[in-house]
């Protein structure tokens, strides 16, 4: 698909083409942005669930103090204190079958999210192609109607000359004027449709 046209934005008229639209919709379309964020979150959950399968170690530094009183009062040395220092810990090689279930659930959710991304991408591509194509068609229609209106205006001038010279009846002049006015009205109607199509394209692009 090819073609380009001016789009009215807050910064004024901007010329955009099909390639520009494709790049912009990939960056700014809100539906695509939301579903891709969900996919990233699901992928992070899968990675986190896989880490739970790794062995875990837990070590604690301990300090213990005990008091010993000698039964021989002759020594009269009073109580003695014994201190023990050391590390206590263990290694957990398997966290249970519940981790396997959590891993499968995370992987299943990631698959569903990827499918949602595929469907959303296809829908956005369709909407972009439809909006772009319809805007091109309506703009070409405006150009065609403008050429028709110019020819009808020329016909009106010619019929007026013939009418003033007595070579054409009055009804032919009125008919030529009516056709020219109808062409101008169709141009205005089509330009309104152009505005609606332009806003639809901007919506798909994520600008509105």
Image (cartoon, rainbow, N blue to C red):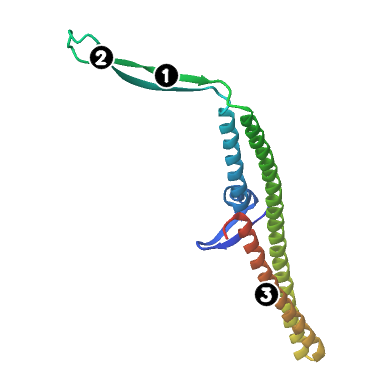
- Horizontal side of residue 101 vs 64, given as left or right: right
Q: Are marks 2 and 3 in contact (CB under 8 Å)?
A: no
Residue 154, by quadrant, is bottom right
Q: Position of residue 82 (x, y in %)?
A: 28, 14
Give residue 69's mark.
Answer: 2
Residue 154 visible within the image: no
Give residue 27's mark.
Answer: none
Q: CA distance from mark 2 to mark 3?
A: 109 Å
Q: Which residue is mark 1?
A: 88
SS at mark 2 in the image: loop
Q: Is residue 93 above or below residue 10?
A: above
> Foreground: 147 or 159?
147
* Image quarter hosting the C terminus: bottom right
Residue 105 visible within the image: yes
Q: Residue at x 56, y 28 (%)?
A: 51
Depth-wise, is mark 1 or mark 3 nearer the camera?
1
- Horizontal side of residue 23 vs 67, given as left or right: right
Depth-wise, is mark 2 or mark 3 nearer the camera?
2
Q: Position of residue 201 (x, y in %)?
A: 64, 59
Depth-wise, is mark 1 or mark 2 nearer the camera?
2
Give residue 188's mark.
Answer: 3
Q: Is residue 197 above or below residue 22?
A: below
Q: Earlier in the sequence, mark 1 or mark 3?
A: 1
Q: Are marks 1 and 3 in contact (CB under 8 Å)?
A: no
């Amino acid at each position: 698909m090819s073609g380009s046209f001016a789009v009215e934005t807050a910064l004024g008229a901007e010329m955009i083409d099909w390639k520009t639209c494709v790049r912009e919709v990939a960056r700014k379309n809100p539906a695509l942005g939301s579903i891709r964020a969900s996919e990233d979150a699901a992928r992070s959950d899968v990675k986190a669930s896989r880490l739970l399968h790794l062995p875990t170690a837990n070590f604690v530094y301990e300090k213990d103090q005990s008091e010993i009183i000698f039964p021989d009062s002759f020594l009269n040395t009073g109580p003695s204190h014994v201190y023990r220092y050391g590390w206590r810990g263990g290694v957990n090689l398997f966290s249970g079958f519940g981790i396997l279930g959590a891993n499968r659930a995370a992987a299943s959710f990631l698959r569903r999210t990827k499918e949602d991304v595929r469907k959303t991408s296809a829908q956005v591509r369709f909407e972009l192609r439809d909006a772009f194509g319809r805007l091109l068609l309506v703009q070409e229609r405006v150009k065609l109607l403008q050429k028709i209106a110019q020819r009808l205006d020329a016909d009106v001038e010619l019929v007026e000359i013939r009418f003033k010279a007595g070579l054409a009846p009055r009804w032919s002049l009125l008919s030529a004027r009516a056709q020219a006015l109808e062409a101008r009205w169709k141009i205005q109607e089509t330009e309104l449709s152009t505005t609606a199509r332009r806003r639809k394209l901007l919506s798909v692009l994520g600008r509105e």
